[in-house]
Structures are given as structure tokens and as C-alpha cells.
Image: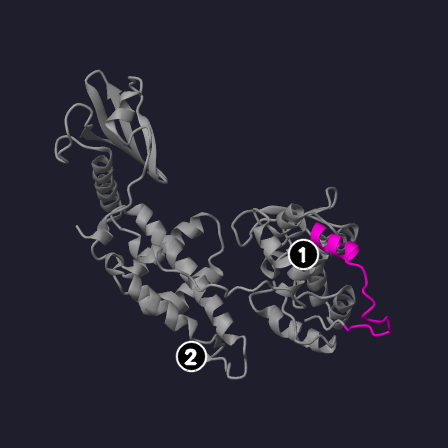
């Protein structure tokens, strides 16, 4: 067995050594330690030493298996008596055999494409939207890596794929079945950074799929992809947001029914797809909330509305049944993927906002406005659907009034070097 085929050994200070196990009480109930989610190694201590057990719990699959005696009295030989590490290796082989029999998988020929399929199935079972993830896999991962066996993946091969991806500009829309076309980034100094951001995002998806496969089949080592590093300093905080005046101009430049959708984005921070799927029943006028049932993370959330937001949603819900969409196009059809792009561009041009903004910028506007008005970061994070404040701090934390800024402005007094005048900077929205 090569180095890359050896799975990492889990550690447990109570079970690692015979001395540690000597301090445990005799019990018919095993002492369990988790090797990975759903996969556990157990130790049952008896009068004449202990016994190793394995337990598998995945969905509706639940099985236990006796591995053999522990090396409490005699030294381990890996065949009839087992150390903690050897018991884990035996357990992993048993886990894999059970799942191979269950799913009819030949692990030696199990490909990256099959791993991606299994991951997407799991992703869908969690109630998460496949849209963008499935599209990224289809465009950027399957063509280059899908045919390779997971067991034969190497760090060098993944690094080469990541480098090629980081040097490829974003694609532009073309006819179905037509030749792929790419953006011209000749005069774009920021293009290289954006390409690296794109590559990093594909690496996250690939690693998630391969880690899921390694968890399903423990003999698959994560050595090859675990050591692949994303490009550093590629991400840059997205600071683009509109002032209140620009927001009003943008809304006034929109025609109904798109204007109502834009207003909802500015007043809730919800994503375009989340708003497009809202029904009248998702708006609770008594509590002043909207219920986002289908979000990017797969988790639902309640967004609390300001009085202005409540007035807007009340008007949208008037005369509609609980299952009717709150926001529809002029033909009463639902807003679909990409329907918003062109009208946002036209509205930006009419509102004299340059460069033109996307619908997603409305989410930034909501978050930026909230932070600048001293709403706690955790509250903003919950409204946006984040589990913690890291994303809010990264993108909007600099806008929050804080102790450092207040202290500097209060104590670093004028030196008399710059005279007062009437020059006022123009806010371009950039």
C-alpha cells in the first residue's frame, strides 16, 4: 500500500494505547470514537481484555461489526490481535465493503465524474439549490478531470488544472452547441485577480466532492487534494454599494413590475432568486417578516422588515392567494434566471450610474446601509442568511463606526496644514 493510499488515523487519548485503555471501567456498552461522520470505532472492555468493534450509520443503513481482540494483553500482529491504528484500518475496509455491496461501486475505477454525481445527489438531498454548483461542475471540472480515477489523482494534476483555470477568462454567452467564447480582458488590469477568484471557487467545489467521496469510501486518501492550495490574496472585499440618492434614482429608472422587485431587493437584502420565489403566504403582515424558504445555503430564514419594507410587501400581497407569487413579470409569469440582467443594465444607464450595477449589488446596498447605521453585525448576518459574521465583517466591516476610527478622529487634532474650502467630493458609487 502506497503512501497516498493510507487514510489518516483518528486519535483518541482514551483508546490510543493499552495503558490508556487500562484506566477504563469494564462495560458491556462500547466506548465509541468517530473516525468520520457516520463511521465509528468502538472498544468494549471485558474481564479478559477488550474487543474492537465498527459501526456504520448512513441514512437508512445501520450495521455493527466485530473486528477482533485489542492488544491489551498481547502485542498486536494485525491478523488476530489489533492495535488502535490497525483496528481503524480493518474498520475502514469493512465500511467500504458494506457500501460497495450497497452501491455496487468498484473503488479502483471510481472516477471524479462519479464522485461529482454522488456529491450533487447528496447536495440535492440537503435541500440546496443545484443551479450554480451544477453549472460550475459542468463547465470547469468535468471536462478536465471527470474521466480520471479518484485513486489516481495527484497533487500535480490538480495544480495543473487550477493553473489553467486561473489563466482562462470568463466565458460569454453563446448559442447552444456553438463554440465557446471568452471575454476580452486585454485592457482589464483586474482580470487576473478575477480569474484566480473563479479558480479558487472551482477548487472549493472539487474538494467538497472528493471529501464526500473519501468519507463514503475510507480507503480513498485525501492526500492528493488536501495539499492543493488556493491562490492567496485573490479575493477582495466587495465595497460597491449605492448611496440613498443613487438608490432612489435607480428605482425611479425602473418600470413596473421590475421596479417592485428592485425595491424588495433594496429593502430586504434578499437574493434575486429568493425574491422571485416568494409567495403571498411567505409574507407575515402581523410579524412584519418574509419567510425565505429556498435559499442558497438550503436553510430557510425569516427576514424582518422595516416599516417601509412592510408597506411595500403589504401592497404586493393585496388580492393574492397564499400560493400566488408576490413578484411576477408583466405577462404574469415568474421571474426566471437572467431575466433581470438586461433590465438592470438599462435602468443603471437611465439612472446615470456607472459602471452599471447588477441585482446582487442591491444586497450589498442593504448590508452596507445597515452596518453604517450601527446595526449589529450578527443581526445583519442573520438577515442576509449567514451563519456567523465572517462574511459581513469581510465585506462591510470597514463601514461600521468603530473605536479605532472614533479615537483617531477625536484625538488627532488639526495641524493647520489644510485650509477649509467649499470643495465637496462627488459620490460616483464606485
Residue 127, position in %: x, y?
Answer: 48, 49
Lateral position of residue 305 relative to residue 234, left or right: right
Instruction: Pick whichever, 386 or 174, lies toward us.
Output: 386
Q: Residue at x 40, y 71 (%)?
A: 165
Circles 1, 2 touching at the beta carbon (< 8 Å): no
Instruction: Pick whichever, 349 or 227, lies toward us.
Output: 227
Q: Which residue is mark 1?
A: 367
Q: Which residue is mark 2?
A: 180
Which region is colored magenta? 403-426
Q: Earlier in the sequence, mark 1 or mark 2?
A: 2
- Vertical side of 348 occupied by 147: above or below: above
Residue 352, position in %: x, y?
Answer: 73, 77
Residue 253 shows which numbered tag? none
Lateral position of residue 89 relative to residue 226, left or right: left
Lateral position of residue 114 relative to residue 80, left or right: right
- Vertical side of 332 occupied by 91: above or below: above
Residue 423 magenta-highlighted: yes
Instruction: Choose top left, top right, bottom left or bottom right for residue 90.
Output: top left
Residue 424, position in %: x, y?
Answer: 82, 72
Q: Magenta region's main secondary structure?
A: loop
What is the spatial separation of the Cα atoms under label 1 and label 2, in whole angstroms?
36 Å
Dot 2, how many residues are within 10 Å of its Cα: few (below 14), some (14-19), or many (20+)?
few
Dot 1, how many residues are within 10 Å of its Cα: few (below 14), some (14-19), or many (20+)?
many
Residue 160 magenta-highlighted: no
Residue 8, position in %: x, y?
Answer: 29, 45
Q: Residue at x 68, y 68 (%)?
A: 330
- Vertical side of 240 occupied by 32: above or below: above
Q: Residue at x 71, y 70 (%)?
A: 429
Disc 2 is placed on an element classified as loop
Question: Furthest-top residue in view?
Answer: 47
Instruction: Pick whichever, 66 or 294, lies toward us.
Output: 66
Disc 1 is placed on an element classified as helix
Amino acid at each position: 500500500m502506497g503512501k497516498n493510499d493510507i487514510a489518516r488515523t483518528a486519535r483518541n487519548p482514551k483508546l490510543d494505547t493499552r495503558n490508556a485503555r487500562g484506566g477504563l471501567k469494564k462495560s458491556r456498552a462500547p466506548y465509541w470514537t468517530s473516525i468520520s461522520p457516520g463511521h465509528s470505532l468502538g472498544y468494549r472492555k471485558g474481564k479478559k481484555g477488550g474487543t474492537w468493534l465498527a459501526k456504520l450509520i448512513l441514512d437508512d443503513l445501520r450495521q455493527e461489526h466485530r473486528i477482533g481482540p485489542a492488544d491489551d494483553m498481547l502485542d498486536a500482529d494485525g491478523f488476530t490481535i489489533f492495535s488502535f491504528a490497525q483496528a481503524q484500518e480493518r474498520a475502514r475496509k469493512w465500511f467500504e465493503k458494506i457500501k460497495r455491496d450497497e452501491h455496487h461501486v468498484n473503488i479502483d475505477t471510481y472516477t471524479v465524474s462519479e464522485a461529482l454525481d454522488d456529491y450533487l445527489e447528496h447536495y440535492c438531498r440537503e435541500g440546496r439549490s443545484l443551479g450554480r454548483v451544477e453549472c460550475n461542475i459542468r463547465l470547469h471540472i468535468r471536462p478536465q478531470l471527470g474521466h480520471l480515477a479518484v485513486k489516481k489523482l495527484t497533487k500535480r494534476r490538480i495544480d495543473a488544472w487550477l493553473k489553467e483555470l486561473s489563466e482562462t477568462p470568463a466565458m460569454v454567452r453563446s448559442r447552444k452547441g456553438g463554440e465557446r467564447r471568452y471575454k476580452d480582458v486585454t485592457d482589464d488590469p483586474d482580470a487576473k485577480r478575477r480569474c484566480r477568484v473563479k479558480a479558487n471557487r472551482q477548487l472549493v467545489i472539487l474538494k467538497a466532492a472528493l471529501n464526500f467521496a473519501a468519507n463514503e469510501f475510507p480507503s480513498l486518501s485525501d492526500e492528493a487534494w488536501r495539499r492543493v492550495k488556493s491562490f492567496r490574496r485573490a479575493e477582495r472585499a466587495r465595497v460597491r454599494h449605492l448611496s440613498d440618492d443613487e438608490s432612489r434614482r435607480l428605482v425611479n429608472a425602473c418600470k413596473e413590475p421590475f421596479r417592485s422587485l428592485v425595491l424588495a431587493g433594496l429593502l430586504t437584502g434578499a437574493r434575486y432568486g429568493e425574491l422571485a420565489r416568494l409567495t403571498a403566504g411567505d409574507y407575515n403582515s402581523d410579524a412584519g417578516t418574509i419567510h425565505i424558504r429556498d435559499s442558497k445555503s438550503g436553510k430557510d430564514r425569516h427576514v424582518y422588515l422595516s416599516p417601509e419594507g412592510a408597506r411595500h410587501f403589504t401592497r404586493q400581497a393585496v388580492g393574492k392567494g397564499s400560493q400566488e407569487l408576490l413578484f411576477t413579470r408583466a405577462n404574469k409569469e415568474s421571474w426566471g434566471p437572467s431575466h433581470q440582467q438586461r433590465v438592470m443594465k438599462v435602468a443603471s444607464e437611465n439612472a446615470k450610474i456607472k459602471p452599471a450595477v447588477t441585482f446582487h449589488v442591491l444586497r450589498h446596498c442593504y448590508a452596507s446601509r445597515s452596518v453604517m447605521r450601527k446595526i449589529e453585525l450578527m443581526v445583519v448576518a442573520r438577515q442576509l442568511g449567514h451563519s456567523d459574521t465572517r462574511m459581513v465583517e469581510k465585506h462591510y466591516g470597514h463601514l461600521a463606526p468603530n473605536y479605532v476610527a472614533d479615537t483617531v478622529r477625536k484625538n488627532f487634532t488639526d495641524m493647520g496644514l489644510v485650509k477649509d474650502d467649499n470643495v465637496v467630493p462627488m459620490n460616483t458609487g464606485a
